Image (tube, helix red, strand yellow):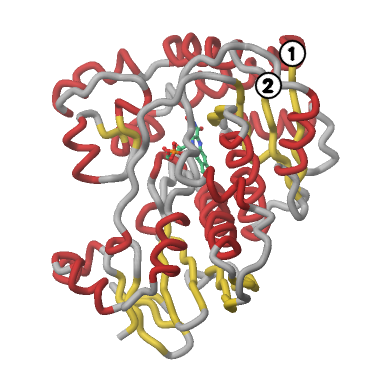
Amino acid sequence: MITGGAIVVGGVTYYLLNDKLNATAAASQQTDISKLKLTPDEREMLSLATLAPSGHNTQPWKFSVEPNTIRIYPDFTRRVPAVDPDDRELWISLGGVLENLLIAAQHAGYETETDYMLDGTAEDHIAVRLKKAGIRPDSQSVLFGAIPLRQCTRNEYDQKPVPTADLNKLETAATGAGVTPMLFTGAAAIEPMLEYVNAGNDRQMTDDAFKSELTEWIRFSNGEADEKMDGLASRVMGNPSLPRWLAQLFIGIILNPKSENKKDDGFMRSSSGLMLFVSQKNDRAAWIETGRAYERFALLSTAMNIKNAFMNQPCEVPELRAQVQSNLTLNGAFPQLLARFGHSPAMPRSLRRPLSQVLVIKE
Ligand SMILES: Cc1cc2nc3c(=O)[nH]c(=O)nc-3n(C[C@H](O)[C@H](O)[C@H](O)COP(=O)(O)O)c2cc1C
C-alpha cells in the first residue's frame, strides 16, 4: 500500500527518498543512503540498472534492497500521462532496468530468480532474488561492457548497411518472451514507416498537452540538466544551451510538425534499418518483456558500434498504432517500440539521478 511518502511491502515500511512529500528526508540523502550499508556488488548492480533508457528520461523507478533481494518499483510521480496515458512506456522502461540489473548480477557471479509481482495495483513491482554462485563463465559479458556506453543517439547516421550476419544477431537479441522484432532495411521498407512517424508528428506537435508535458521535461540549459540529472538535455539532442525563459519564447517555432518532420526525415533516411518490437500481449508483463528485449538489442548494437534511437510516434498515437497493427498484419499482436539504427559518432550523454534519490529505505 502506498501511504504518502511510504510504501508498505510485506508489513515493512519503506520511506521514499525522492517523494516530493518527503522533502526533509530528501535533504539528508547522503546520510540516509549510507544507512543502507550497500555492498559494492549491490551498489554496482543498482548503478548500472539506472543507466537504462526511459521515455523523456523521467527515470520512473525506485529500488529497495533487502538481503538477497532487490525490488524495482514504478515511480508514478514521474508519469507522463499525455504521451503515455496507460503507463505502457513506463513499464517498458522498468524492463530495461531489470535487464541491466540481471546482466550486472550475472557478471558479478550471482544466480537470479525474477518474480513479476503484478496484479494491476500501485503495489506492483519486480523482485529479483540473488544467490552468490561463485565465479562462472559470463555469457553476457559483451552486454555488460556496453551498459555504460549505450545511449539513444539522436543524429543522422551514415546509411551504410549492417551486414546480414550482424542483423541476425541483433534480431536474436531483440527476441524475448512473447516479443518479436520486425526488421526493416532498404528505402522501400523504411519509407512507409516514415509516413507513420510524420503522421505521429502531425498529431503530437499540434497537441498542447503533449507539447507542454514535453517542454516540462526538456532541460534547456546545461545548468538545468546538471542540477536535475533527468529529462531531455538540449546538448543530448544537439541543441545549444539556453536559459529556460529564452527557450520558451521560441518553443512554438521549435516544436511544430514541419520542423519535426524535416528532422525525422533525415534521421530515418540516413538509418541502416528499423526494428519494430511487437508483443503478443499488451499488459504490464508484456511491456516489461519488451523493455528487456529492446535493452538487449541496444546493448548488443552498442557492442557492435551500431547506434540506435527511438521513433516511437507510431506506437504512441492510438490511431496510428491501430493502423500499424492492421497494415503490417500483426495478427492481433501489438507494436510497442520503433527504433532506428546505423552508424554515427556518439552524442553527449544523458544524466541519471544518484542512487540516493531512487532508493527506498527500510524503517
Ligand atoms: C519506452 C521509451 C520510449 C521512448 N520514446 C522516445 C521517443 O519517442 N523519441 C525519442 O527520441 N526518444 C525516446 N526514448 C528515449 C529516451 O528519451 C532516452 O532513453 C532518455 O532520454 C535517456 O537517454 P539515453 O537512453 O541516451 O540514456 C524513449 C525511451 C523509452 C525507454
Asked if 50 appears above or below 21 in the picture, the reply is above
Quarter of the image for the C terminus: give it. Answer: bottom left
Is residue 40 something one can see in this rendering? Answer: yes
Quarter of the image for the N terminus: give it. Answer: bottom left
- Residue behind mark 1: 186
The residue drawn where x is 62% and y is 11% is: 159
- Front residue of this view, candidates 153 and 60: 153
Q: Amino acid at mark 1?
A: Gly
Q: Position of residue 140 (x, y in %)?
A: 65, 53
Q: Amino acid at mark 2?
A: Gly
Q: Position of residue 11 (x, y in %)?
A: 43, 90
Q: Earlier in the sequence, mark 2 or mark 1?
A: 1
The residue drawn where x is 35% and y is 20% is: 238
The residue drawn where x is 76% and y is 55% is: 177
Badge 2 marks a residue whose secondary structure is: strand
For the residue carrying disc 2, how many other residues have a C-alpha within 10 Å: few (<14), some (14-19), or many (20+)?
many
**Quadrant in the rendering for residue 254:** top left
Task: Note whether ligand 1 is within 8 Å of mark 1.
Answer: no
- Front residue of this view, candidates 104 and 326: 104
Cβ–Cβ below 8 Å for labels 2 and 1? Answer: yes
Q: Position of residue 262 (x, y in %)?
A: 48, 9
Badge 1 marks a residue whose secondary structure is: loop
Is residue 313 something one can see in this rendering? Answer: no
233 relative to 197 in the view: left or right = left
For the residue carrying disc 1, how many other residues have a C-alpha within 10 Å: few (<14), some (14-19), or many (20+)?
some
204 relative to 355 in the view: left or right = right
Asked if 101 appears above or below 122 in the picture, the reply is above
- Residue behind mark 2: 273
Task: Note whether ligand 1 is within 8 Å of mark 2.
Answer: no
